[in-house]
Image (tube, grey):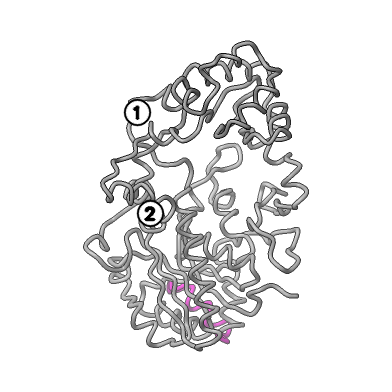
Amino acid sequence: MGPAFQGIRVLEICSMVPGPFCSRILADLGAEVVKIEPPQVGDESRYAGPFPGDQEDASSSFLFHYLNVNKLGITLEVAQPEGRAVLGELLQKADVLVIDFPPRDLKKANLDLQQIARDHASLIIASITPFGLTGPHADYNAYYLNTYHSGPDGYLNPSGRLANKLYPDREPLRAGGYYGEYQAGAVAAVSVVAAIYSRNFSGKGALLDISKQEALMSLDPGDIVQYANGSGMRTRFGRIALYLGGLTECRDGFWVLQLHFDRQWEALKKCMENPQWAQDPRFDTVEGRHQHRGDLERLIEEWARSHTKQDIYHRLQQAEVSAVPVLTPTEVLADEQLKSREFFMDGAMPSVGRVPVASLPFRPPFSHSPAARQAPSLGQHNGRIYQAWLGYPESKIKSLEASGVI
């Protein structure tokens, strides 16, 4: 069986994380993805890093490499009239357009997605914007910090036992890295997959309006529903009220425990070789353990400080207690579970050499390649795409380059 989306052509006009991650998923599923970047400057993520040795180099951004492996790359200034005409020709050959221009930038570039959808009836357009294409906030500017805090999750961070202990009064924080941006990209990819499936029956394309805010809201809507129903507002302290444990220190780092039931408490006591303090009647019931959780969690941590996280992990998992180690990047790469599932593909980067590349977080029903095709350099495939897709002679390509269109 071949890749699911073999024969599907995708155009990506995006920067940074959500749109590129969406089309990266489609590329890994077999689609031919052509990344369109502005001439000279390219995608913003080329300058975002991290970089080898922390030395900024637009050709060696690990972020750009991860998001854009298995893609082809061309340059095109879509804001120019001649560039829009070229884009129109490319769209005639494409099945999907992934674009992340907010409404005001679409207007500046004279790109009307509704008109594009009418002109290309079978085209699937995935529009990814901070707040959606409509509504009173549609034209608002936003970076990831803004969109993350437009949902409820930021209000509840930092949370967890250790965070609440160390930073009880700290201001709301967004999640590390680009957690929310990847969520928006994954939502967009699911939307595109559904639209492709629908088109197989109807023959009609679709304009998909993906809001980063709404993608983040979909992660944990329960807090909003709880508040709307008059059940009160959960805080970062209440977030950990449902279980004991949380992030806990040990001899060589950290591990995470979630202790819910009596049977888990009995198993944990046995794993700890039944210390005298564990016989305290205050800890005999779920209610008692919650009432005296501060003392209990401190005592568990004192025990853990004499053990490694791997020892704790395997000992507690064997006893069916929910516990996992907090892995460092080095430990993630050496993880036997990920190795056995061939999660990391072999990749290459200019001036860096071979690098591991994370694959899809599921196993598709076809054999996936153990190697990832290198992310494209800026305009690397101009000749190939403009000739193969549009039939442009070399003289026209050079003319477009000279005029700054590509």
Density class for disc 1 (Cα within 10 Å; few <14, some 14-19, many ≥20) is: few
Residue in the picture at 55% in, 39% down: 55
Compared across the picture, whether 77 is left or right of 69 comes to left
Disc ID at residue 170: 1
Residue holding disc 2: 217
Residue 395, quarter of the rendered image: bottom right
Compared across the picture, whether 150 is left or right of 387 comes to left
Residue 52 position, x and y percent, is 61, 41
Residue 273 position, x and y percent, is 71, 18
> Cα distance, mark 2 to mark 1?
23 Å
Image: 51 above or below 162: below
Residue in the picture at 48% in, 55% down: 183
Residue 111, quarter of the rendered image: bottom left
Highlighted magenta segment, given as a residue range? 390-406
Residue 257, quarter of the rendered image: top right
Foreground of the two, 281 or 349: 281
Which kind of residue does numbered mark 2 sit on? Met
Question: Mark 2 or mark 1, which has the lower sequence index?
Answer: 1
Foreground of the two, 149 or 320: 320
Residues marked 2 and 1 touching at CB (< 8 Å): no
